[in-house]
Image (cartoon, rainbow, N blue to C red):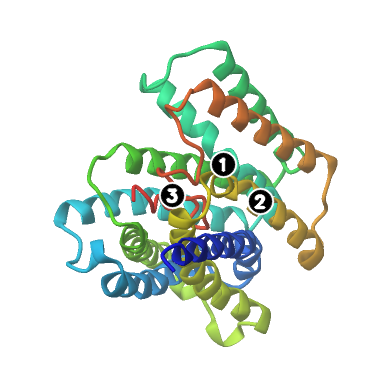
Amino acid sequence: MGEAPAATPSARGWAALGAVYLLWGTYYVSIRVGVRQFPPFLLVGIEFEIAGVVLYLAARRFEPASRAGLTARQWRKAAIAGTLLLVGGDGLVSVGEQHVAASVASVLIATIPLWMVLGDLLRGRLRWGWPLLAGLAVGLGGAALTAGGTLHGTRLGGVVAVLGAGVAWAAGSLYWRDDPTPMPALGGSASQMVVGGGALLALAAVTGELGRFHPAALQPATLFAFGWLIVGCSIAGFTAYTYALAHAPAGPVAACQYVNTAITVVLGATLLGEAVTARLVVGCALIICSVVVLSRASAGRWRLPGDAGSSPGPAGDIAGQEA
């Protein structure tokens, strides 16, 4: 009877990880549908504010480390990380997806580990060497190949915005990893959503998005995508991810970003009619290969998304686990 509980969490952990793969694989497709009628900052601002409040209340109720609430230092960490990850990350992705396909956005976002390694190199946290340089060159080449067919007109701005989101997510993940302030897993993610969501809503107001939003004109597909972002991608997705971190093997969790990318490409093609081009497939393969090279070359001093430093979710990478 003493061994039964150990088997159950493992099975539940795999189930939670499978749910994360499916839920977060829909994120970029949902954003692409949502920004057809929602202004970009308003869309993700409402998403994260609602989801953040719900998850924070749940953390206070069910997560022992969050029951007393967060300290001022923890809220400060959440505010800085949430601004980088949500405003700079998800906000820019939403702006970019007004002009580029969901599948292209998801492949470009897979470059986050490259920017993290480059950040550690520039700050002297890693030593320059041929393996790292080769990994960066291959990954950036994959990103350039993926974006190459879209570099004209407004799509160029969309590509720049999505790549900027990847840089912001990398910066936020590095900050979260390197700041020694301990954070609870679910409470840490929720607090970033609350702060980042509020900042996104303020940005929506400042940029005049509220005046351009016409809720009475929203179509059923847009409303479904909006609701799914809140309930499926954020609330259910982050709850499942937090559980998977504790109860699923680290390797499959670390591969989450790349499984999500594959699901996004398939959903983009089947639901939105997006083209699966040779550029997209080869570019994605090059980026994934570069991440493998970089993770080996850095010899444990740098972690894949999904390890205990950052979460590869729709918050891109809400660093929900440092934790």
Mark 1 surroundings within 10 Å by alpha-carbon count, few (fewer than 14), some (14 through 19), many (20 or more): many
- Mark sitting on residue 181: none
Instruction: From the viewer's perspective, tell me whether residue 124 is left or right of residue 22.
Output: left
Position of residue 183 relative to residue 40, above or below, is above
Type of amino acid under label 1? Leu
Residue 272 lies, with reference to residue 292, above or below; the image says below
Q: Is residue 99 visible?
A: yes
Which amino acid does the dot numbered 2 rest on?
A: Val
The secondary element bearing badge 2 is classed as helix
Q: Look at mark 3 in the image and give the residue it sits on.
A: 88
Which is more toward the observer, 182 or 168?
A: 182
Residue drawn at x 37%, y 69% as measured from the top left: 52
Query: Which circle's residue, 3 or 2, is located before the other in the chain?
Result: 3
Instruction: Please name the amino acid that badge 3 sits on.
Output: Gly
Residue 122 position by quadrant: top left
| Secondary structure state at the residue bearing disc 3 | helix
Left or right: 94 in relation to 235: right
Q: Nearer the viewer, mark 1 or mark 2?
A: 2
Q: Which one is nearer the viewer's eye here, 202 or 293?
A: 293
In the rendered image, which residue does mark 2 sit on?
259
Cα gap from disc 1 to disc 2, whole angstroms? 19 Å
Helix, strand or loop at disc 1? helix
Pointers 1 and 3 in contact (C-beta within 8 Å) = no
Residue drawn where x is 60% and y is 66% of the image: 35
In the shown orientation, is residue 134 left or right of residue 113?
right
Between the C-alphas of marks 1 and 3, the distance is 11 Å
Residue with the mark numbered 1: 163
